[in-house]
Image (cartoon, rainbow, N blue to C red):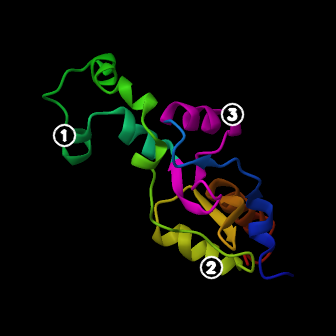
Amino acid sequence: MSPRSISDLALHDAPVVRVDDTVEDAVKQLVESQLPAVPVVDQSGVYRGIFGEREFMKARFPGYLNHLHGTAFLSRSLDDSLEKRDACRHEPVGNFMSTEHIDVGPDFADTQVAELFLHHQVLVIPVVADGQVKGVIMRQDFFRAIAERFLAGGTAA
């Protein structure tokens, strides 16, 4: 068994967005790719971060929501809040991307991937070689591969 047989089942090609692409363009890429997050690269194609569902919600909702422990006192209408941040569609994705570099090199092992998913709240882990994104490992597929092996009575890694 290879040291990453589980991760290989969870590895996907992924589109990338550039730090200067608009939030609107990045969201289009997310929806079309059906991934929960996509890698962000600079003008040279070097990996710089992630833009995904969480980053989009941070861009789309007023910043103070991130600091509240409850929202009962706010308007119940989602439309009111969304209207206030509609201008984010034209802002660069680099303003909202996560710059915490949670990625693996091309020689990664399943145990490294498992450790990253266990210790970080990420849905994808980019595979990066020489600064270039080679694909992403999806947590959902990594879990599914482990679960299927577990249910079949085999070892998990």
The dot on residue 112 is 2
Disc 2 or 3, which lies upstream in sequence?
Answer: 3
Establish if 130 lies above or below 151.
Answer: below
Q: CA distance from mark 3 to mark 1?
A: 33 Å
Q: Element under label 1?
A: loop
- Spot occupied by residue 140 in the image (x, y as percentages of width and height): 64, 54
What residue did someone put label 3 on? 32
Considering the image in quadrants, where does the N terminus appear? bottom right
Q: Which mark is residue 70?
A: 1
Q: Residues within 10 Å of mark 3 (few under 14, many from 20)?
A: few
Q: State how far apart marks 2 and 3 are (Cα).
A: 29 Å
Q: Which of marks 1 and 2 precedes in the sequence?
A: 1
Point out the residue furthest to the left here. 73
Tell me which residue sits at (33%, 17%) in the image.
Answer: 79
**Category of crowding for the residue at label 2, using alpha-carbon neighbours closer than 10 angstroms: few (below 14), some (14–19), many (at least 20):** some
Q: Is residue 17 left or right of residue 70?
A: right
Magenta-colored span:
23-51
Between label 2 and label 3, give the one nearer the viewer: 3
Looking at the rendered structure, the number of numbered marks drawn on it comes to 3
Query: Residue 5 sits in which quadrant?
Result: bottom right
Dot 3 or dot 1: first in sequence order is 3
- Please, what is the three-letter code of the amino acid marked with disc 3? Glu
* Quarter occupied by the C terminus: bottom right
Residue in the foreground of this view, choosing between 74 and 1: 74
Pointer 3 with pointer 1, Cβ within 8 A = no
Residue 96 appears in the rendering? no
Q: x, y (%) of residue 78?
A: 32, 21
Task: Name the residue located 27 percent from the left edge and 34 percent from the top edge.
Answer: 62
Tell me which residue sits at (17%, 30%) in the image.
Answer: 72
Residue 17 versus residue 70: which sits nearer the camera? 17
